[in-house]
Image (spheres, coloured by chain):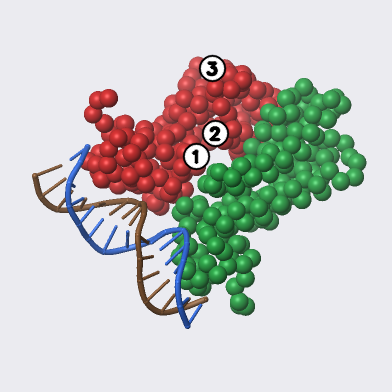
Chain colours: A red, B green, C brown, D blue
Amino acid sequence: MARTSREDVIAAAGRLFADRGFHGTSMRDLGDELGLLGSSLYSHVSSKEELLVEVIARGAAKFDEAAAAARAGDASVAEVIRRLVAGHVDVLVEHASEARTFLDEARYLETEERDKAIAMRDNYEGVWRKVIADGVEGGELRQVDPVLGSIFALSTLNALVRWYDPAGRLSKGELADDIAAYVLEGLGA
Amino acid sequence: MARTSREDVIAAAGRLFADRGFHGTSMRDLGDELGLLGSSLYSHVSSKEELLVEVIARGAAKFDEAAAAARAGDASVAEVIRRLVAGHVDVLVEHASEARTFLDEARYLETEERDKAIAMRDNYEGVWRKVIADGVEGGELRQVDPVLGSIFALSTLNALVRWYDPAGRLSKGELADDIAAYVLEGLGA
DNA sequence: CCTACCGATCGGTAGG
DNA sequence: CCTACCGATCGGTAGG
């Protein structure tokens, strides 16, 4: 394998943070994962906290890209929700470590960075709220509170990191279809 | 305050594990919370791991009690689901620390104890699966896979620990009603 | 429940 | 990226 890059370090950190938690991962653990010493990591990053920041930024970016893609072009509210669901599943499966670290470990960031992570998350949830509000206004969904509706939908999605195995019986596409059906029913589509 | 009891120690451990995570809590942190030294805790428990085991056992027991109460007497599938939702919300709100530690920190248990925690969780989920399967069989719900249906319902519920504030606008009862409505719609009741 | 302490491990640095 | 190391903190113990 070639020289270890900063991106390699961040990717490996994401894997360990997702598996063992931020506080359950030591810099020496991370060094082992990459075949070098814990102290050698400091030529790539200046602190363990910085690694958490970088992993979470990558997770947040993936969710944002997925949301932008789901809104592109014009489509019915139900169709946009189907795309949002499929995009969210895709991020959770294809960028599992970063996504899980973003969802589960952001609370261990220091205040300033944690506030940024919360803002990134709120921005993403805002896309969902907007779509649901449009659906309620246009009569395509029942009279749900868009705040609760988006939380409920995202709750079902985010829980995937705890049980879904991409190597299991259910394919990513089938899963997205099932969740979209459940969410759309729940929103009264 | 009277002498610190073993139950006091376990309750305080639950609070810290839920707030800061198991690996983010030191025995000295826990001692501070109780007004004594970290080393003094070892007259109440024999290890930090034991505290995690005890907190999680208490969380699991609350969920089991709630499930048993929801099934008592005879009621329609929709009514049992409403009761299961209300019971779950109640555990999450009234026993937040133990419930959250059960849900989020059980993965840090050592193998044997972790397997027990997984079995307790599976047993509880089994109640949900059974009720949903009954509902599908009796035509009270649409043709959902009971495994997916129970995971989806519990995903919405378990996410509460991350956003619901009992002191906020939404009362526990209203929340339970909203979630029950969403879940029942999602299951095609 | 405290005093006094243990070896192990933590995040991190200086210098090459 | 390693060598060699730092002070701080970790879970835990002996003895009272």
Q: Position of residue A100 (x, y in %)?
A: 48, 36
Residue sitting at x 46%, y 60%: B26
Residue at image mark 1: A103
Q: Residues within 10 Å of mark 1 (few under 14, many from 20)?
A: some
Q: CA distance from mark 3 to mark 2?
A: 30 Å
Q: Earlier in the sequence, mark 1 or mark 2?
A: 1
Residue B116 or A124: which is nearer the viewer?
A: B116
Q: Can see residue B123?
A: yes
- Displayed quadrant of residue A89: top right
**Where residue A24 sits: x, y (%)?**
44, 47
Same chain for the residues under marks 3 and 2 in the image: yes
Say whether marks 3 and 1 touch (CB < 8 Å).
no
Q: Is residue A94 left or right of residue B144?
A: left
Q: Chain of mark 2?
A: A
Spot occupied by residue A116 in the image (x, y as percentages of width and height) = 41, 44
Q: For the point 67% across and 41% down, which residue is it?
A: B119
- Quadrant that contains the N terminus of chain B: bottom right
Which is nearer the N-term, disc 3 or disc 2? 3
Residue type, label 3: Asp
Q: Residue at x 62, y 56 (%)?
A: B54
The residue indicated by pointer 3 is A74
